[in-house]
Image (spheres, coloured by chain):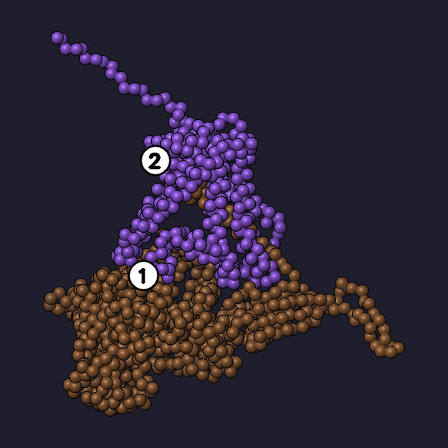
Chain colours: A brown, B purple
Amino acid sequence: VTRLRGAALPCALLFAARLEAGSRVPPVASYVIEATVRADHGLTGSETIRFTNRTAFAFKDLAFHLYLNAWRNDRSTWLLEQARGGGRPDRGLVLKDPARWGWSEIHRLVLDDGTDLTPSLAYVSPDDGNPEDRTLVSVPLPRPVAPGETLVFRLDWEARFPRAIARTGWKDDYLLGAQWFPKLATATDAGWNAHQFHAGTEFFADFGDYDVTLTLPKAYKGHVGATGVLKEETELAGDLARARFLAEDVHDFAFAASPRFEVVRDTFSAKGLPNVEIVLLLQPDHRAIRDRYLRATKVGLEDYGTRYLPYSYPAVTVVDPPWGSHSEGMEYPALFVGGGHWLAPKKAHSPESVTVHEYGHQVFYGMLASNEVEEAHLDEGFNTYGTLKALASAYGDPALVVRFFGLPVTFSGVSVPYPFGTTDRFQRWQLASRSDAMAVPSYRQLDGDAIRSNAYLRTALLLFSCERTFGEDVWAKVMKTYASRFAFKHPKTSDFLAVVREVAGETAAAAVAGIVATAGGVDYAVTSVESHRVRALAGFSGEGSDRKFAAPPPSEAGTYESTVVAQRFGDAVWPVEVVFTFADGSTLSRPWSGAEQWVRWTLRGPKLVSAEVDPGEKCLLDGNRLNNGLRTEPDARASRAWTTRLMFWAQNLLETFSLLGLAAVP
Amino acid sequence: VKRDSLFVLASRGVASALTTWKALLLALAANLFLAYAFAHPVNAALRRALDRSPFGARASAAPSGTWRLYGEMSRARPDVFGDLSPWDEIATGERAERGPAHRPPLAGFLAGTGVAGAAVGFGILSAALAALFAGGFAGRFGSTEDRGSLAAFGADAARFAAPSLLLGALSLLGIAAAYRWVFAETGKLYEPEDLRYEWESVALLVLRLLAFLLVAAFVRVLVVYARAAMGRAGRGNLAGALGASLGFVSRRPGRVLALEILFGALGLVPLALWALLGPVWDGREAGALALVVLGQLCVVFLRVLARAAYLGAASAFLARAAERPAPAPAVTSESEPAPAP
């Protein structure tokens, strides 16, 4: 075992080419990998890992992820969870075809002093105790790695990529190499943050530098993209080719290869932002959307760069995956996978939405490297918020596009506006599973709906609600402060809440913390409205000889007394305003903290027409907009407009049964 | 212009259908009545939800109002719509992403609730009623007298009720079987995502759809000509009518298919035009509402007319075929002299 303190590194030569390494973040886990990928999608490789303990914890063991073992057999935690969530665990994996399954095995693990740790390797399942799961492996060390020490070790392994599933593996001659090498768990002050591979969550790792040499069949030469910069590419004997990539200050390394890739290069440049080379690896049947991919990447670079954090690497690789590859929409440092259709109407905003979103992960995941396994909302939710803002700003609202038998039809008249288009999806997910608060570690949440609901749209709509409630400028400052303060760190929810408190104040922080802490929904309703004319006193007044009786006649003119009751039906609390509209056209607004179960307002003035909680729809988390307001008098015009249309379509639907042949005439 | 050209047959069909205008209006009224009953629960729910809510007025003024209202209603009142995914699957040809991997096609229809469930019952009821009407139309088109008489129409509808309903049931079963075996089962022969390109998958999907539509069209054609034959014969002999239809259709499959497509398109044109160009009532002027409702009724009437005209055209086609002289028997003009003994 060699432990080195300070800058004396035994692998210094391997990293000599770096000029900027450590300029953004001191490396914790750096890799030198040499791997050969065969035409049968098998892989043999060796890697040298240099781990520098920058925590206060002394590590007595090592823990590695072997993600490809999620598809080793159908007892893996990943496949069991996928089946439990109602998904189709067999998608892509055909039981009788061994070439469609994947696995990964460490053959040898030695420290750089020659100590062989291989016999001590043991699969562990700290999350669910599943003895069949082999996605996490642990090995005790002869001596702990103390804070500040560096440990260097070498590892030989063999693996097979599965038929592409969950954004890794092959389809035909396309290969997405993701989660493909034995990867060190994340070092924290509490020890290793090491989880098994779960179906609903992603990844978490330490920053470091990667020097990766890939040997592939010769057909792939010139058609490989990866995290980092291509340093050299050579042909080898035996119809092989070799490509070497260097990446600095990243926490993962992925590559994509296909002889059919058409390589398109472009450069992003915008005032105040660094230039970035864009490498698009395009499918030949997607030439029609080439420029849309490039523009969307630039939209992401500019919008996220301005609002949150400029892109920090010289190049970004955009992978356009082939049809049926199950690799659409995934992010890795400096490389992301988009996804587009052969026929892609512009108003559908696809591939734009997935491109902007996956680029956005370069910020919320790539540079703000939060824990995707435990706090998936910090990358997916924040990034969904960023995506929707960028798309709305660059493209406007999309239209409804429905695919009929694979052919897209655009309903131009039906707008699906940002961010309301996502509100409905969120509410449906939330209805399906209101089991967990965002504060519950993502991998421990009940099911896929709970994870998706919390990680993506609940968070995104929470951020939109903050923006609308506490002010756009204030919220922009919150997001920018958070992004710049935690770049190249591992931020947590508590870090974000601290920024909210600092920039937007205690009320905002309390509102956000309240939503994070509850599994319940937001639902405010006006349950009663009354408005009566105030009459002069009727009955007796005065006492003794002054006692007088009065019976005032009803009068057309006068003041009205109106009573409004609003209730909170949801468990979650959000500060809202209640707006009262009067017959003379005037309105009155009253703030409500939203905390009480109900509030009653009594107002004197013109006749009340309606009362509504949050008519400006500042809180996008409200699960039922239909009950937010009440009129004192019914108005059937809106319902009549829709019932008229509905009747027409009902008539035609019944008529269509005849068209389909149930009978010849009508 | 040939007397049995598509144009002439279509024109004769439309002319025949127009002579039965009272029956057409009756069919429209039946459709309206059924549609009212079918849509009533949704209409009532809409009124309950919107008439006292300011949301309705705001949503109706927004370009995304319909979309948002549907979202809110289907979440707040899931009982009203029920599970529409089986219908969505039929309409788009896309299997539900998260559904059970091996759910049989057409599963879940009969167990549906809300609008999704009611559509099955109302669809069958509508079809049964249409089958009864078809008997009446077939009888009138087969007759040269009293075509406009509602009483004669009713008498024909009653006379042909049983065979016409049976034909309707045969048609329904035939088309359901075609969907199951021609469209759905062929989808199990390949894994779309294993194909190299998306367009290959789309092409195969569209081919399967076209194959299903072709079989369904011939099922419809057989039923239409069987009804027309029944009307012309004046007898409710189901087997005889089907036999006549089969013989007629098998001799001229291209022509009858062309007529089927022509009237199918004629039935869809008014709907497509209204969907694209038709006005939508904005909830303000009552006079405008009356015009919109009248326009909507006209569209449905034109579709009813197109369907009746199809039967009229089929009847005319049968009549025209019957008018043609039978082909002359083969005669030997000369005989060779017997060889000399």
Nearer-the-camera pick, A348 or B336:
B336
Residue A509 to residue A287: above or below: below
Pointers 2 and 1 in contact (C-beta within 8 Å): no
Indicate the amino acid at tag 2: Gly
Q: Residue at x 61, y 68 (%)?
A: A527
Which residue carries the number 2 mark?
Answer: B254
Seen at 56% across and 63% down, the residue is B55
What kind of element bears circle 1?
A: helix
Q: Is residue A551 left or right of residue B130?
A: right
Residue A486, position as x, y percentages in the image:
38, 81
Q: Is residue B84 left or right of residue A149?
A: right
Instruction: Answer yes or no: are tags 2 and 1 on the same subunit.
Output: no
Q: Farthest residue toward the right?
A: A545
Label 2: element kind: helix
Residue A367, position in %: x, y? 34, 77
Say which quarter of the image contains residue A336: bottom left
Query: In terms of depth relative to the viewer, which is nearer, A452 or A556?
Result: A452
Give the quadrant of the N terminus of chain B: top left
Q: Is residue A301 visible?
A: no
State the residue at coordinates (49%, 32%).
B159
Which residue is nearer to you in this view: A653 or A300? Answer: A653
Inter-mark Cα distance, 2 to 1: 44 Å
Residue type, mark 1 in image: Arg
| Residue position marked by numbered label 1 in the rendering | A290
Find residue A567 and report its image quarter.
bottom right
